[in-house]
């Protein structure tokens, strides 16, 4: 019997996180009572409350907490929260308190689990795998690190035979999973506050890969050393599974897909970037091995709409383009900017970037400076601290990072003043990028450009 079946109540400490909210939705969809705490009300917590989940935003022990019984209540928390009175209450009263990763691991023990790991590409790949499963009507549930434009959610419940999970390397959380199938997209250095150096993060991914019981069910981007036998995938070079013959026609990308025994021509979709075709190649390899036919996969690829804040693109009648992306590592920013430069080589690019974490800014400062210097103009926002404190990272500021950027047209701004600065700029393409709360600029920017276009039409 699964230990999770013994509980009727689930309390989430930090319920507004992207990973936590997916779990909350899972238990809510399973008919359990779900409630929780988060420090701020966001679009996501508002949606959770509209779905019937009870959320509070004050660290207060109220009657909803005191009436919970430890025998039938599981408390789930995120490591991002260090100290909290509510969490102390549950620990002091001997409730079962588990990390999010542990609970997700317990779910994967009882399903045929497809886990997607990697420092870059895991959200797009896991969301695409989930979309393909949905279009093939497989009995699955998914737990994603982004909001699917097709589902309008980071969670979908379509059965329990399979689970599709985004395998998070932070805090070595992915080692709590029980993957039957897995993808490893990249092992670049990141989260050095946890791992220390590149060799240790690579070792973490090798430990994750070792969890997969069957060599034929582990798919690794060609060129990565994962420490065991596996199947490879690639773009524009031969591998066990690979895509090539990429071409663009009227904002659609076409590509051919190769398995070890056949070639399927003319997959087509609207998701830009070579790196995204690479993600699609991994997803197609998995679904092909699950026995889904290529006619179904072609239709599913064609109607995949992407993920919110993963190269979300708007093209306006006046020729201006607005792109919003979650990239928060130099490699990811390079991929986004490279894609823009490939498809729009002559357009003037304004980048608004919010660094995420003092530690990541410190560890990859030169890489950030180099990637940001590829723009024509830069507005650099203050560092989003998340779980970190400025006092522990003396001298690591956006002003310090800005000095390393080689652009002439560059400035620093607080988030609160960024929108007014953007409205003063001359640009063809605007890119807002970062993983913090820069997403609060998205709606005002869209409304502003739309209204500007409308006013010039009349």
Image (cartoon, rainbow, N blue to C red):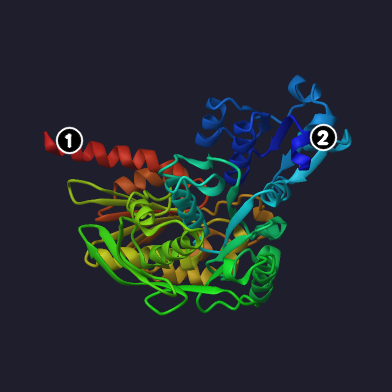
Which residue carries the number 2 mark? 90
Secondary-structure class at tag 1: helix
Q: Quadrant of residue 350?
A: bottom left
Q: Nearer the viewer, residue 1 or 201?
A: 1
Residue 255 visible in rendering: yes
Question: Residue 242, position in %: x, y?
Answer: 41, 72
> Which residue: 60% across, 59% down?
358
Count residues near mark 2 (Cα–Cα under 10 Å), then give few for <14, some for 14-19, many for 20+: many
Question: Residue 212, position in %: x, y?
Answer: 66, 65
Q: Nearer the viewer, residue 157 or 126?
A: 157
> Is 349 positioned to the left or the right of 137 in the image?
left
> Is 356 positioned to the left or the right of 12 in the image?
left
Residue 392 visible in rendering: no
Which residue carries the number 1 mark? 455
The Cα atoms of the two marked residues, 1 and 2, are separated by 56 Å
Secondary-structure class at tag 2: helix
Question: Residue 67, position in %: x, y?
Answer: 80, 21
Give the mark nearer the N terminus: 1 vs 2.
2
């Amino acid at each position: 019997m699964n230990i999770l079946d013994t509980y009727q109540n689930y309390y989430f400490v930090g319920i507004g996180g992207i990973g936590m909210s997916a779990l909350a939705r899972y238990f809510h969809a399973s008919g359990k009572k779900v409630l929780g705490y988060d420090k701020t009300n966001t679009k996501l917590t508002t949606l959770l409350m509209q779905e019937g989940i009870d959320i509070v935003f004050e660290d207060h022990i109220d009657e909803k907490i005191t009436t919970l019984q430890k025998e039938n209540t599981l408390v789930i928390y995120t490591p991002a929260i260090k100290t909290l009175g509510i969490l102390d209450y549950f620990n002091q009263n001997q409730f079962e308190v588990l990390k999010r990763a542990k609970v997700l691991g317990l779910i994967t023990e009882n399903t045929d689990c497809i886990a997607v790991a990697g420092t870059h590409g895991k959200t797009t790949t896991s969301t695409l795998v989930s979309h393909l499963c949905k279009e093939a009507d497989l009995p699955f549930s998914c737990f994603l690190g982004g909001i699917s434009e097709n589902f309008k959610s980071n969670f979908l419940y379509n059965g329990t035979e399979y689970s599709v999970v985004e395998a998070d390397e932070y805090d070595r959380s992915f080692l709590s999973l029980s993957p039957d199938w897995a993808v490893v997209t990249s092992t670049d250095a990141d989260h050095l506050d946890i791992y220390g150096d590149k060799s240790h993060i690579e070792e973490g991914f090798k430990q994750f890969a070792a969890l997969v019981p069957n060599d034929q069910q582990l798919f690794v981007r060609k060129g990565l050393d994962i420490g065991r036998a596996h199947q490879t995938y690639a773009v524009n070079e031969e591998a066990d599974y690979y895509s090539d013959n990429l071409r663009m026609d009227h904002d659609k990308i076409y590509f051919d897909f190769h398995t070890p025994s056949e070639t399927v021509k003319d997959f087509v979709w609207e998701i830009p970037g070579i790196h995204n075709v690479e993600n699609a190649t991994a997803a197609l390899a998995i679904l092909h091995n699950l026995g889904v036919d290529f006619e179904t996969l072609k239709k599913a690829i064609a109607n995949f709409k992407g993920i919110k804040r993963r190269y979300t693109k708007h093209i306006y009648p006046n020729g201006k383009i607005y792109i919003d992306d979650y990239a928060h590592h130099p490699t990811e920013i390079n991929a986004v900017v490279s894609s823009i430069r490939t498809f729009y080589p002559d357009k003037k690019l304004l980048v608004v970037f919010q660094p995420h974490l003092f530690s990541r800014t410190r560890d990859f400062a030169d890489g950030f400076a180099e990637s940001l210097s590829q723009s024509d103009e830069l507005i650099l926002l203050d560092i989003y601290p998340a779980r970190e404190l400025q006092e522990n990272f003396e001298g690591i500021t956006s002003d310090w990072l800005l000095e390393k950027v080689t652009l002439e047209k560059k400035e620093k701004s607080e988030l609160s003043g960024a929108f007014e600065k953007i409205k003063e700029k001359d640009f063809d393409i605007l890119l807002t990028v970062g993983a913090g709360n820069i997403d609060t600029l998205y709606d005002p920017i869209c409304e502003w450009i739309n209204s500007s276009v409308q006013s010039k039409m009349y």
